Amino acid sequence: MAAKIPIQPAQAPEFVSDERRLVASVLGKDRKATAEFVDRCADWMYPFLRRRLVPRPDVIEDILQDILLAAWQALPTYRGDSSLQSWIFGIARHKIDDYYRKRILEDGTSEDEEDCAPEPALAPNLEQQLDSSAQQEKVQQILSRLPESYALALIWRYRDEKSVREMAQLSGKTEKAMERLLARAREDFRRRWNDVEY
């Protein structure tokens, strides 16, 4: 039995109707509708994932499959309070956070390592570099050459705007360990930035 999806007033009626039909058809095990659902999700998610998984473009397909599977399994709970695309993006954000958490936990650095430079001294310059569209290709190139845990920590902190506390909570590391990881990552990024001719 298909889940009933309420119409949200901010959405155009034909758009809502289309999404309702698609969701109902997927829940009714219509193969064509399921293929359309997968195509839509892939079109929405691929650029989003590509931007957030710069150091590991080879995992995009795997995470996309995880998102699609999670969305398909959770589809009966979709209430239509937001657009289908927004709902899928919510699932994607959680899957990316899970991936970052796992990879940062596998970093293996100890909390007893010596302290590195504090964040405020380096952060403003790095934020400008990450936001500048003219230098985006250089940033992508450097991120792809960093150790994965460094690149993911920088993306999580500066692109996804997670606080050090949030990152520590999500990764299971202490705030001090996360600050050290970020300091090493920023230092490596800065060194490579200065070494790369562009």
Image: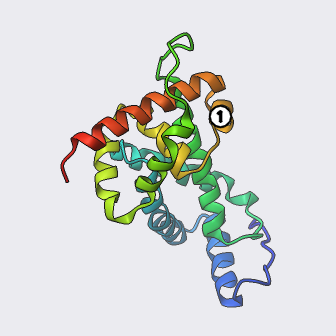
Front-lying residue, 142 or 192: 192
Please state if 155 lies on the left or on the right of 17 as rendered. Answer: left
Dot 1 surroundings within 10 Å: few (below 14), some, or many (20 or more)?
Answer: some
Q: Which quadrant is the C terminus positioned in?
A: bottom left
Image position, residue 153 (x, y; %): 50, 37
Front-lying residue, 26 or 151: 151
Residue at disc 1, secondary structure: helix
Please state if 154 lies on the left or on the right of 80 as rendered. Answer: left
Q: Residue at x 22, y 40 (%)?
A: 195
Farthest residue in the left direction?
A: 197
> Of the residues shown, which amino acid type is indicated by label 1?
Leu
Image position, residue 188 (x, y; %): 36, 32
Farthest residue in the front direction?
A: 121
Q: Residue at x 33, y 51 (%)?
A: 140
Residue named by callout 1: 170
Task: Relative to 3, say whether 91 is above or below.
Answer: above
Task: Relative to 31, say whether 18 is above or below.
Answer: below
Q: Residue at x 45, y 67 (%)?
A: 43
Please state if 141 lies on the left or on the right of 1 as rendered. Answer: left
Q: Is residue 8 visible?
A: yes
